[in-house]
Image: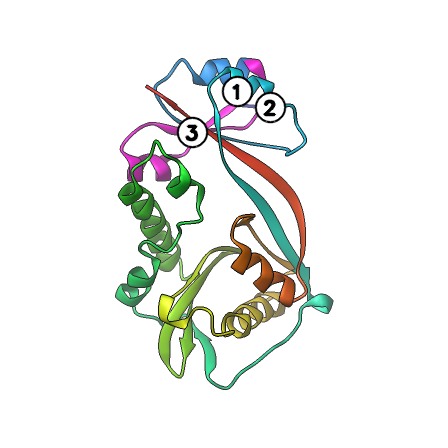
Amino acid sequence: MKTIKDTPWDAAAFGMHTAEIVEYSDAALQHALQMPGHYTIKVDPLADKRLLHEQGFYYCDTLIEPYCAAPNLKSVTHPNATISKQTDWKGLLTICHGAFTHGRFHRDFNLDKAHADLRYDNWLRQLYENDAVYGLLWCGELAGFIAHSDNKLVLHAVDESHRGKGRAKYWWSAVSAELLAAGHTEVESSISAANLAALNLYASLCFSFRHPLDVYHRLVE
């Protein structure tokens, strides 16, 4: 098994070699340091971090995985809240651009924020071209999006004008229910532990949480 996997989608946004280290070992870390670029490694929060600190890796985020099986999902609806895959790309891009300040790439002080925005914009475009993006509508107006890969909600955002009004639970409930109705046994996602709004949203719909991972980065010049 390769200990380092290239991430070309990140390289396209940041204009440098990027990769994820998939084995936490001194040999894998030393191997990464031989090639200039930006590296990510995800480790158990209880793992000994000594090797990471010795090799110059720095903490960026903790990810947790919300998940929910069909019998547990809380169904909440509102007549004004609807979802649709027939959504204008420009409207989606406007909501996406700059929306992911909780993300580890925005929190990495070695990376340009504009390039971090481009990473998410590019990812959304790819998902949109694969017909994997639900537009979130309020009274017919585009208010956000949820993109998925099979049963996983991989990218989602709500327009600033619609935040803080208790509306997100209707959209998340609807998209989750549709994915479960398509035959998936559960719906899952991945969020930053620092994103309390998202955490509380998932909890309100009776999602549980598992698989926490601490994320460390390293820029090799």
- Secondary structure at badge 3 equals strand
Callout 1 amino acid: His
Can you see residue 117? yes
Query: Which residue is painted at 33% across and 64% down in the image?
Result: 92
Residue at the disc numbered 3: 19
- Secondary structure at badge 2 equals loop
Q: Tell which of 160 and 121 is nearer to you.
A: 160
Earlier-in-chain disc, 3 versus 2 = 3
- The image shows residue 102, relative to residue 95, as above or below, that is above
Image location (x, y in percent) of residue 201? 57, 64
The answer to whether residue 63 is left or right of residue 91 is: right
Q: CA distance from mark 3 to mark 1?
A: 19 Å
Q: Are marks 3 and 1 in contact (CB under 8 Å)?
A: no
- Image quadrant of residue 19? top left
Callout 3 amino acid: Ala
The C terminus is located in which quarter?
top left
Image location (x, y in percent) of residue 131? 40, 62
- The image shows residue 16, relative to residue 133, as above or below, that is above
Q: Tell which of 17 and 178 is nearer to you.
A: 17
* Number of the label disc, if any, that sits on residue 206: none
Mark 3: few, some, or many residues within 10 Å (few <14, many ≥20)?
A: many
* Number of the label disc, if any, that sits on residue 53: 1
Callout 2 amino acid: Lys
Magenta residues, as a range? 3-26
In front: mark 3 or mark 1? 1
Can you see residue 151? no
Mark 2: few, some, or many residues within 10 Å (few <14, many ≥20)?
A: some
- The image shows residue 32, relative to residue 199, as above or below, that is above
Q: Are marks 1 and 2 in contact (CB under 8 Å)?
A: yes
Q: CA distance from mark 1 to mark 2?
A: 6 Å
The answer to whether residue 134 is left or right of residue 74 is: left
Query: Which residue is painted at 26% across and 64% down in the image?
Result: 90
